[in-house]
Image: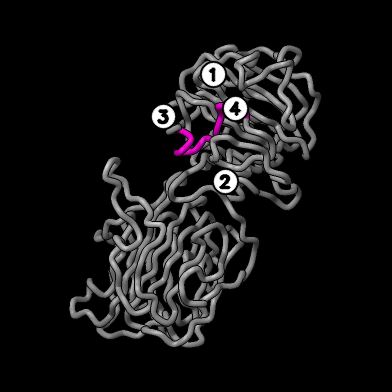
Amino acid sequence: MASTYLTRTQVAGNRQIFTQSFWCKIADTSSTQSLGGAFNDSNNYNYCYLDGGNLKLQWKQSGSVTATLDTHRKFRDINAWYHIVYAVDTTQSTSADRIKLYVNGVQETAFSTATYPTLNRYTEVNDNGTTYNIGSASSGQNFNGIMSHVHFCDGTALAPTVFGSTDATTGEWKINTSPSFTLGANGYTILKDGNTITDQSSNSNNFTLGGGTLTNTEDNPSNVFATLNPLIPQTGANFLNGNNNCHRTTSGTYRRIGCTIGATSGKYYAEFLLGASQWAGVCLTNGGDIERTTLGNNGYMGEYAADKSVGVRNDGIVYSSGANVSSAQWNQGSLSTSDRLCLALDLDNKKLFLGKNGTWNVSSNPATNTGGISLTGDSYTFCVATSNADCIMNAGNGNFANGTTANLISSEGTNASGIGKFEYDVPTGFTALSTKGLNL
């Protein structure tokens, strides 16, 4: 969603009392990104944004900032879905009750800056003819990440429990997929089921695509999928498409980038599109980091004897535990930019299976545990090593594209688990590396 935003022109509504609720997964923690708000012009706006990881609400009217809430804590978890709600009622006599900001059901009360609107203040929200954007501000600052279940209530300051609830078993905050609330004139529900921006409430407050491309993803508040992890120390890497595409601008060395989710058991499948000299495979994980002790953070995957990773390069070279095992484990030649590298990670039997365009190598068969490369570590994740080119991963999210590569899925394969979408058939017994996949 880095260049994508939604827009709608508001009708007359309650400019003093309203509630905005949305679920979002952050892909970038460094830049200033608007989550949404009302924008009249550069001197009159009300919006919520992330500024270097800080969550902020800022209202500016008549050229002056009239209200600001700036959280102390930073929001830097690029694997989790955050539920953000802000409820506004400027008619409240106590200033701190005029704006309430909630994250995952808990009210934020510690702010580095807290300036509340004056009593009975009118905002740009619900102002007739004023633009309301989702994922953008008047000066750009587009949101880089994923959004889901975006709700707006015109005329009531609601509690977060309308939109979420605490799981009785895990104690975690979870989504209420069909919240009930009084909509008001500008109320709406969008992005509830897939990427539709048609209002899914009883109103007809549809949004339009203001820019970019709106891409549907399997990743959602109820099932978090593994993506490449931009928080792993590296240089010269740009992450695109919800962190499923990595382009490293530095050539000559290979910096490993693992996923946001690792596992010690279970069977998981993923597909990759590799650019020139790109590697994909699996790496040993350690507390969310990846194995680097013998590599100085660089090197081919599986190049060293003490290295427990396995890597496949686009030219068909395969390394495992310091050995080039191409002749034993790869018989399908090089991978073009249109070929899919298929990886089946079997942590129950400690093996990795390699395939190209849905065909498994050297008579191997992950479904029957036939063949495959033995793994010696305990905890693994999918991993790439990039050098001046694109490497795109589909761990089940579905369609992702960049400027030069077609969408990953042209015709969806079968998947008995029902978790994730892939180009080719998922081997029997395997699933996507996601929170639901981990719990099969």
Q: In this view, does 326 lie above or below 142?
A: above
Q: Can residue 48 be seen in this view?
A: yes
Looking at marks 3 and 2 on the same chain, the residue that comes earlier in the sequence is marked by 2
Q: Which badge, 2 or 4, is on the more N-terminal residue?
A: 2
What whole-number distance in Å separates the C-alpha atoms at marks 3 and 1? 17 Å
Per the image, label 4 sits on a secondary structure element best described as loop
> Disc 1 residue type?
Thr
Q: Report x, y in % for residue 186.
A: 44, 79
- Judged left or right of residue 274, residue 242 is left
Image mark for residue 294: 1
Residue wearing tag 3 = 287
Q: Residues within 10 Å of mark 1 (few under 14, many from 20)?
A: few
Quadrant of the frame with the C terminus: top left
Q: Quick check: marks 3 and 4 in contact, CB under 8 Å?
A: no
Label 4, on which residue?
428
Taking the magenta stretch, the answer to whether it contains residue 6 is no
Tell us which disc is closer to us: 1 or 4: 4
Quadrant location of the N terminus in the rendered image: bottom right
Helix, strand, or loop for circle 3? loop
In this view of the protein, which residue sits in the foreground, 334 or 117? Answer: 334
